[in-house]
Image (cartoon, rainbow, N blue to C red):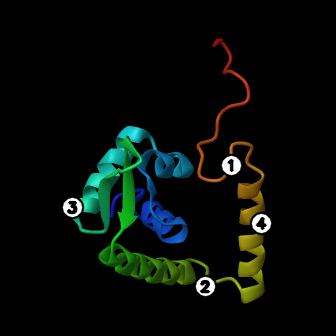
Amino acid sequence: MRRGFYGVLATLEEFGAGAQAEIGRRLGIDPSDMVAILNDLEHAGYVSRARDPEDRRRNSVTITDAGSQALVWFDTAIAAAQDEMLSALSAAERDQLIGLLERIVARRPDGPGQRARPERALPGTP
């Protein structure tokens, strides 16, 4: 599984078909990386791409039935790995950890899924 596969599939499942560029922006994926990810997902039969009939310059991406099934498999694998990783924590501690992580993500000035940008330049740079 290539980095970004899960995010793309989960985004399509949650929000429905969308423009290739918009999905990439939503997930903070560089456009060239997005093309490679979609090529692999399309080759695996997890997504389909077609020209947007309203704007022929855009590609509309749709999750396939196989992509939805793969997403269920990924969700199961992620849940099992998470359970194993957090096995030392009680249910209350897990809930607390998740709440704290959600607060961190929500407070990012550039939004969830975006790469952090430095607020000031490094010494010696403009």
Question: Where 22 sits versus 6, above or below?
Answer: above
**Local secondary structure at mark 4:** helix
Q: Residues within 10 Å of mark 2 (few under 14, many from 20)?
A: few
Specify which label sits upstream in the sequence, 1 or 3. 3
Specify which label sits upstream in the sequence, 2 or 4. 2
Q: Nearer the viewer, mark 1 or mark 2?
A: 1
Q: Which residue is mark 1?
A: 111
Question: Where 122 sits versus 46, above or below?
Answer: above
Give percent across and percent down for residue 103. Answer: 78, 61
Labelled disc at residue 100: 4
Real-space Cα distance between discs 1 and 3?
Answer: 31 Å
Q: Residues within 10 Å of mark 1 (few under 14, many from 20)?
A: few
| Picture residue at 36% right of the left edge, 50% below the top | 53
Labelled disc at residue 87: 2
Specify which label sits upstream in the sequence, 3 or 4. 3
Tag 2–tag 4 contact (CB < 8 Å): no
